[in-house]
Amino acid sequence: MIPVKKMMIVIVTLAFCVSISAAEDKPLVEITLVSEGKPSASIVVAQNPTPSARLSALELQYHIRKITGAIVPIKTDSEKITGTRILVGQSKQTNALGIKGNDFKSLEYLIQFRQGTIILNGRDWQDTQENRKELGRDTYGHTIQSSRHQIDYYKATGLVEQGAKPIMLPGYFDDQGTCYATYHFLEQFCRVRWYGPTELNIVFPSQKTLTIRGSEIRRSRDLKHIHALGGGWPIIKVQWNNPSDDELNLYWRRLRIGGEK
């Protein structure tokens, strides 16, 4: 009979070996996003990005700024881009590389490192009149449309000095593969952790230079649908530093609430 402790060591070791072997066929690429507090990359989105891509670009910029103090610029694919690129969502740049959002399945996403380029992509819901007509309700009777919350992004992240930044968040049941790729990237490669919706609840490493190494991750969510709420509203106010509705709605996206219809 194998002791439980030894069995757990064997299982963890096997899992580690499987993950390493899966990445062995692609070489690791090293990319510097910020060097000594100065940005050395650009975040690139389409001229008219999906709600998922727009949010992802802002989240990348915000978290990298909190880690390094540097503001990595967000540019559109109509601008001239030089140097290192973080391609967020589908754009002319990703099309040129043969990567298109519609080639992904629902809940599937891609993190890919190339020389001088990081790609964060997946299947995203497009904000069109036709798509807004989709019918359906969640477990509590709310419409699909009602979960596409409008927030002031800068206010929700404490960047009020930059003015207002109203955006529409992707709905809980909308395809948002680019968001999944971005949050996975921030967790695994930038070591960000979200334990609640306010800045007090977020863990950021502190470093002036941000250099990361990776190859490729392409996967679908294991949990097809996530719904969770840590107690009722009075408990949230106490445990999570009195968050606003905008902070809460942003936090649910970071936790990947929702998923498959």
Image (spheres, grey):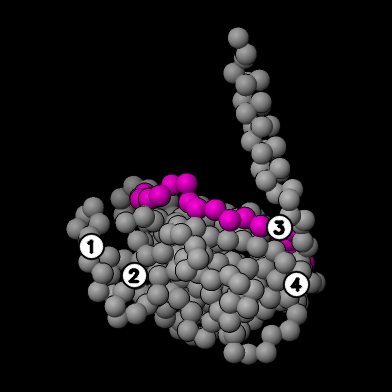
| Above/below status of 222 relative to 178 | above
Residue 231 appears left or right of 256: left
Residue at image point 39% right, 56% down: 259
Residue at image point 69% right, 85% down: 81
Name the outermost residue toward the bottom.
79
Q: Residues within 10 Å of mark 2 (few under 14, many from 20)?
A: some
Amino acid on which the number 3 mark rests in the picture: Ser
Q: Are marks 4 and 2 in contact (CB under 8 Å)?
A: no
Please name whichever residue, 249 or 114, is drawn nearer the observer in this view of the structure.
114
Quadrant of the image containing the C terminus: bottom left
Q: Which image quadrant for residue 146? A: bottom left
Name the outermost residue toward the top.
1
Q: Which residue is mark 1?
A: 136
Q: Which is more N-terminal, label 4 or label 1?
A: 4
Residue 146 part of the magenta segment: no
> Under tag 1, what secondary structure?
loop
Residue 18 appears left or right of 233: right
Question: Which residue range is magenta in the image?
Answer: 204-228
Q: Which is more N-terminal, label 1 or label 2?
A: 1
Q: Name the disc covering residue 116, or none.
A: 4
Instruction: Say if residue 247 shows up in the picture.
Output: no
Residue 201 appears left or right of 260: right
Q: Are marks 2 and 3 in contact (CB under 8 Å)?
A: no
Mark 2–mark 1 Cα distance, whole angstroms, equals 13 Å
Q: Which residue is mark 3?
A: 215
Q: Residues within 10 Å of mark 3 (few under 14, many from 20)?
A: some
Amino acid on which the number 2 mark rests in the picture: Arg
Q: Give how far across and how far down residue 23 sits, in percent.
A: 70, 49
Q: Which residue is mark 2?
A: 148
Q: Give how far across and how far down residue 196 sits, in percent.
A: 47, 55
